[in-house]
Image (tube, rainbow, N blue to C red):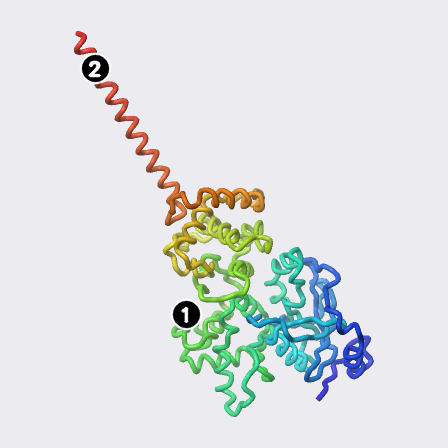
Amino acid sequence: MDCYFPFAGETSMIESLRRVRSSQMSRIIHSHRSKVPANQLRLLRPVALDSNTLCFRSKIVPRAAAPPYTAVSYTWGDEEATKVIYLDDREFHVRPNLWFCLYHLSIAEDKSEWDYLWVDAISIDQSNEAERNAQVSLMDQTYKNSTCVSVWLGPANEDWLDWDRSWIDGADRPYWTRVWVIQEFLLGTKVEMFYGNHRLDWEHFRTLICREGGNSPYSIEPENTDTYGALPLLLERHHEKYPKFPQPLYSLLIEHHRSKCKDPRDRVFAFLGLISPIERKFLSRYFPDYTLKEDHVIIITLAHLRLATPRLAPQVWVDISSKNEKLFLGLGVESRARRKQLLRRANRFYYTSDDSRTIDCAQHFACDDAVEQFMGTHSEDPDELGEVESSNVRKTGRNLVLVGLALGLGVLLYCKRRWEAS
């Protein structure tokens, strides 16, 4: 059955669908016509839908005066963008999981407190690095300031004879393994869960999963959090934890080292909204920046963790070595040889605690890439960032001993000659 969504300027749902299906414009691929700066949002409003066609209108609004909107939290998935929606009467290709997400959220829109949707794959021009950097830098604000965060767990088995069991199955969906959803789920003021065409408040979902997993939903230090994939985040979203008590980046990387993402640089960028304002100020000199290569992001991060974390979070014991499995898995680096190479390069990166001073990353890495290519295979492989300095100290000490011995030998020879001459 066709569903109608009233929208200013639309005379009827049927006319909207007819125009999309018959117009030559519908066969033109949509491209964003203008860049959205950091202080604005690109929102989507459902116009019309049926079982095969989804139509939306885009609208750019100031963040400070945004209408009620839901920020959608979902997984991109590894599938190709084979499904089509119509954005401003033009084709826009999306992945299947997002298509079904938009379909069910559009149905829910007329019974919700929000009128618009914010969806990163559409609301951010993914081909525009400047817009991507600007929007990702305020991603936490996008979710914090939304009317509601809509969590899409994916299509569900429609045989819901056992309501509780069906929702329990949702606690192990791929959604809970992704790195971006950590920030999105924890920072939203209000969170609603969508699983197929079913809808549930997150607190009811937490109560159900905690009861099944043998945990108290109000425990600050819970146990048995590995029972279901959803439990760590459900219990982390505690009124005495987030967003009042941000964690150091070092701790977040280790705690969520199993989380996955499509772009490896997001293993760092996705946590920027969860760290302290002071630490974020340090990192904002460099991140987010999608012009940086993956290795360059890791090198800057390692330099930051070594130099800034002990100062910003002295209560955290920091182990920046290639043997720290959780840290490097959190950064997406499994090879021990690559870890040592990145540590060596991080030691050469000029990272200062003076936030008024920074370096030209492009210039630095252009030189450092060349140095590494030329000398990397002949360099020492320090296991820790400080080992280069330690090695230099040892060499200096050895040289001083040799000089001392040479001088001593010279003095002895001089004295011997004087004695023989006398």
Foreground pick, 325 / 246: 325
Circle 2 — which element? Answer: helix
Q: Where is residue 415 drawn, in percent x and y?
A: 21, 15
Number of other residues with Cα within 10 Å of mark 1, as a class: few under 14, some 14 to 19, many 20 or more: few
Residue under pointer 2: 415
One can see residue 363 in this view: yes
Q: Where is residue 117 drawn, in percent x and y?
A: 67, 72
Q: To which quarter of the image does residue 375 belong?
A: top left
Q: For residue 194, which numbered disc appears in the image?
A: none
At x 77%, y 81%, the residue is 17
**Of callouts 2 and 1, the N-terminal one:** 1
* Amino acid type of the residue that numbered disc 1 sits on in the rendered structure: Glu
At x 52%, y 55%, the residue is 294
Residue 163, relative to residue 118: is it above or below? below
Which quarter of the figure is the N terminus placed in?
A: bottom right
Foreground pick, 354 / 6: 6
Foreground pick, 69 / 95: 95
Residue 352, relative to residue 87: is it above or below? above
Foreground pick, 223 / 402: 402
Residue furthest out toward the top: 422
Residue 160, relative to residue 91: is it above or below? below
Circle 1 — which element? Answer: loop
At x 76%, y 74%, the residue is 26
One can see residue 319 in this view: no
Q: For residue 221, which numbered disc appears in the image?
A: 1
Q: Where is residue 147 drawn, in percent x and y?
A: 65, 72
Q: Are circles 2 and 1 on residues that touch, CB within 8 Å?
A: no
Number of other residues with Cα within 10 Å of mark 2, as a class: few under 14, some 14 to 19, many 20 or more: few
Label 2 or label 1, whichever lies nearer to me, is 2
Q: Using the numbered discs, state the Cα–Cα distance from disc 2 to disc 1 in whole angstroms.
A: 75 Å
